[in-house]
Amino acid sequence: MQRPDTPRLTDDFARAMHLALIVADRSGTIRFANPAFCAMFGYADDEIIGQPLTLIIPERMRGAHTAGMSNVAGGSKPGLAGKPVEVSAIKSDGTEFPIEITLATWSDDGEFWAGATIRDVSERRERDARLMRLASHDTLTGLQNRHEFMTVLAEKLSRGTPCTLLMMDLDGFKDVNDTHGHMVGDSLLQAVGVRLPYLLGEKTIIGRIGGDEFAVLLAGCGDPLVAQREATRILDAFRKPFSLGGMELELGASIGIALAPSHGREAEELLASADFALYRVKASGGRAYRFFEASMRNESQSKREMRDRLRKALLKNELEMYYQPQVDLATRRVVGFEALIRWNHPELGLILPGVFLPSLEQSSLGCDIGWWTIEEACQMAAEINGPDDHYRIAVNLFPQQFRSSHLCDRVEDALWRHRLAPECLELEVTEEVALNDSEASMQALKAIRDIGVGVAFDDFGTGFASLSSLQRYPLTTLKIDRGFIRDIRTLPSDLAITRALVTMSREMGLRTVAEGIESVEQESVLREIGCQEGQGYLYGRPMSKADAVASLGRATAPQTSIRAKHR
């Protein structure tokens, strides 16, 4: 049997392979290239054979390649033999692309030969680049993600580069999300991701830090005037609505500013400083900017620690309601209670709300505690309301609850679960909270009144509400602040204001409650001017729930109004 022609079979095998193969001689002249190689590089067989190997090598790399080939041909051991290496190559049309090449050398009858297998790794490079982008960029907006932004910031600061950091939070984004859904919310974030780079330019480093928080880095600039100018430009840009799918969505911005190195020499420190300033802006109503001040750090840290302790207190059922009697001024008969929130700390004892409630400003924990307060109020009403009783419980809302688009739903749900009629509940808001966004406030209060729940203005006269606002808001009760009651016998102005409020309240069909009554003389004046109800130390101090329920049992023919608030 005749032996097959081995060289011919080897040649046929090489030509049939999908892997690109090439062979060159000692001088670097191409002596063999299979069809896969020709297809990859765009040459016909007769166009590539006899050409120098440098034809497929970028010009910047040809010198190193020629020197390496000469050394190996002269007897040096090839360092990369058998190891795949990624390099760049050139196609026939001049296009440069990445390849993975594995080299081999051998001798045949004293002649030196070099061969290589070649893979086009363009797709792999592109895939790796996509993964790198995913690792460093926010997938929703295309901006840098938090990790990449902080990496860049840290690099700039390590070089001693002066930097300005603007932390930005979107005002009104949660309402858009709650009202129109997360798809619209995501589209809005994408629109912000387009508007900011367009406004600030390509050289400005912008990142999405998380949720609706964005960060802007002005590298090489530590000038507060420049920071002020850029912050103003951003605020002005956000005064224009975002048009999405036929909707015009209003969105504001709050900005905290920190300058390096004066406000922080490390990335996390500078970010925290800008965040402290941002928190202060949000607490003041938002839609403005503010620079970091050293005093913010201690104050904010203290509030954060208090919120952490409060969060644990809520989980451990350490929060309680205490009840202070309310009376009918004409008869001094107890007609209800004001429920006052307390923190029964296991080590410090009973803590008054003035110590811990300020730490809840702009915190979602305010909503959690607020919902708990509504639950407690409804539970108390369920316990004291018999077949012939009509006790009302008023709950003082936190600002976070008042801004929630789910407020009415949460209230209805609580009433349903405790089997209470809507008239058993009254929601109290301070005029400052209601007037912070008058149109939104009006809609929220109207929704509450539409389901039959009462609405009260608490501490009226201490804020900026005008008397005419009583006509605009759907109120059922007006509470007169204790500040007007304290000197009602000695200050004619306090007496005049209180008389006007009582008269107007009565003519508008509102209930009037005077707070802070401590003497018989104060009570007498209030009774004379027609005030219906009052409360204060004259009638009793706050008491436990058990004592409050017992006192109701002692009352005759009660027309009770139980009022739950945070004070």
Image (cartoon, grey):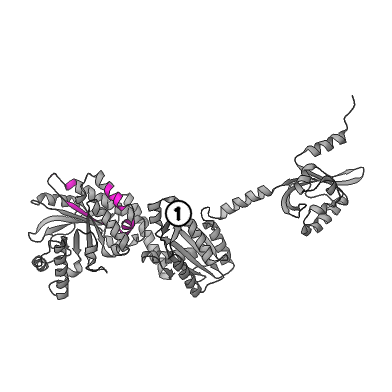
Image location (x, y in percent) of residue 533: 13, 60
Magenta span contains residue 77: no
In the image, what residue occupies the spot 51% across and 64% down?
Answer: 216
Q: Going by the image, does 282 lie left or right of 533?
A: right
Q: What stretch is highlighted in magenta?
A: 383-412
Q: Going by the image, does 437 lie left or right of 329?
A: right
Q: Within 10 angstroms of label 1, few (less than 14), some, or many (20 or more) residues?
A: few
Q: In this view, does 186 lie above or below 479?
A: above
Q: Going by the image, does 528 lie left or right of 352?
A: left
**Residue sitting at the far front:** 246
Image location (x, y in percent) of residue 20: 77, 43
Residue 275 visible at all = yes
Image location (x, y in percent) of residue 390: 15, 49
Image quadrant where residue 104 sits:
top right
Q: Going by the image, does 225 lie left or right of 363?
A: right
Of 402 and 503, the residue lying toward us? 503
Q: What residue type is labelled 1?
A: Gly
Of 555 and 14, the residue lying toward us? 14
Image location (x, y in percent) of residue 146: 52, 57
Of 309 and 469, the residue lying toward us? 469
**Residue sitting at the far right:** 109
Q: State the residue position of label 1.
A: 245
Residue 536 visible at all = no
Image quadrant where residue 281 sits:
bottom left
Under tag 1, what secondary structure? loop
Q: Quadrant of the C terminus?
A: bottom left
In the image, what residue occupies the spot 27% across and 48% down?
Answer: 412
Q: Quadrant of the N terminus?
A: top right
Total label count? 1
